[in-house]
Image (cartoon, rainbow, N blue to C red):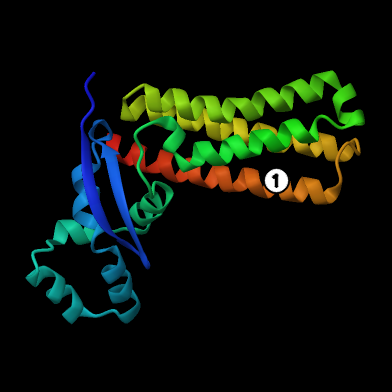
């Protein structure tokens, strides 16, 4: 299947960014319309300014565009800041890769490494996060991508569960547990935001 990309330019907070969104996700045009007004809409929200809305409308920003700038869409845009042409460009995948390095390093410790079953399970679950994000992206389908993101999200929860076992068996310290758990939470939030948006596009 041939893929086409919709180039976009806009502002999120104080950052100027260039985006390319794959059109096979079906979001290129919507994001293009909405992205350039996010900063202004955020300001209007805080000010509750009806005059400001009129100002935007006078510049050709229609009601549809304003509806597109929802908190979920804003979260989605923050997740995908940057060009996404390969799965390696997905921030959630990059964070999952960093997490995987940490998991492998943690499981090299003498006590943890001797528990072959737990060591292998947590490593497989960690790798599964990365792999499912990558495979979902490669499927070139919103529905399948969302399904694979759901599996990646489940794998993240599995890693968290295994961390509790490692903590209870004193394979890792409370500090390592807390730090690693927080990293998994970050990856999970990114995946979930992406997944929710793709699911909304399917309906």
Left/right of residue 150 with respect to residue 36 in the rendered view: right
Q: Quadrant of residue 177?
A: top right
In the displayed structure image, the side of residue 62 where residue 121 appears, left or right: right
x, y (%) of residue 88?
Answer: 46, 33
The spot of residue 178 in percent (x, y) is 75, 50
Q: Position of residue 140 (x, y in %)?
A: 32, 24
Residue drawn at (86%, 25%) of the image:
113
Q: Quadrant of residue 154?
A: top right
Tally the numbered discs: 1
Q: Residue at x 31, y 81 (%)?
A: 47
Residue at mark 1: 181
| Image-based side of 14 in relation to 186, left or right | left
Quadrant (top left, top right, bottom left, bottom right) of the C terminus? top left
Q: Judge by depth and name the residue closer to the eye, 149 or 1.
A: 1
Residue 68 seen anywhere in this rendered image of the structure: no
Residue displayed at 34% across by 34% down = 85
When the figure is inspected, residue 35 is found, relative to residue 19, above or below; the finding is below
> Is residue 125 shown left or right of residue 63?
right
């Amino acid at each position: 299947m041939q893929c086409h990309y919709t180039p976009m330019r806009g502002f999120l907070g104080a950052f100027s960014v260039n985006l390319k969104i794959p059109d096979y996700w079906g979001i290129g045009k919507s994001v293009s319309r909405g992205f350039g007004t996010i900063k202004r809409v955020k300001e209007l929200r805080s000010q509750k300014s009806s005059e400001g809305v009129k100002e935007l409308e006078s510049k050709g920003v229609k009601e549809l565009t304003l509806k597109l700038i929802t908190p979920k869409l804003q979260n989605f845009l923050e997740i995908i800041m940057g060009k996404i042409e390969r799965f390696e460009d997905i921030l959630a995948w990059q964070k999952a890769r960093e997490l995987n390095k940490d998991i492998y390093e943690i499981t090299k410790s003498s006590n943890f490494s001797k528990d072959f079953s737990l060591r292998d399970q947590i490593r497989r679950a960690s790798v599964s996060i990365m792999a499912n994000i990558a495979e979902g992206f490669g499927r070139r389908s919103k529905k399948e991508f969302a399904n694979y993101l759901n599996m990646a999200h489940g794998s993240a929860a599995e890693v968290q569960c295994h961390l509790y076992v490692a903590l209870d068996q004193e394979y890792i310290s409370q500090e390592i547990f807390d730090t690693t758990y927080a990293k998994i939470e970050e990856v999970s939030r990114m995946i979930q935001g992406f997944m929710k948006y793709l699911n909304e596009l399917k309906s």
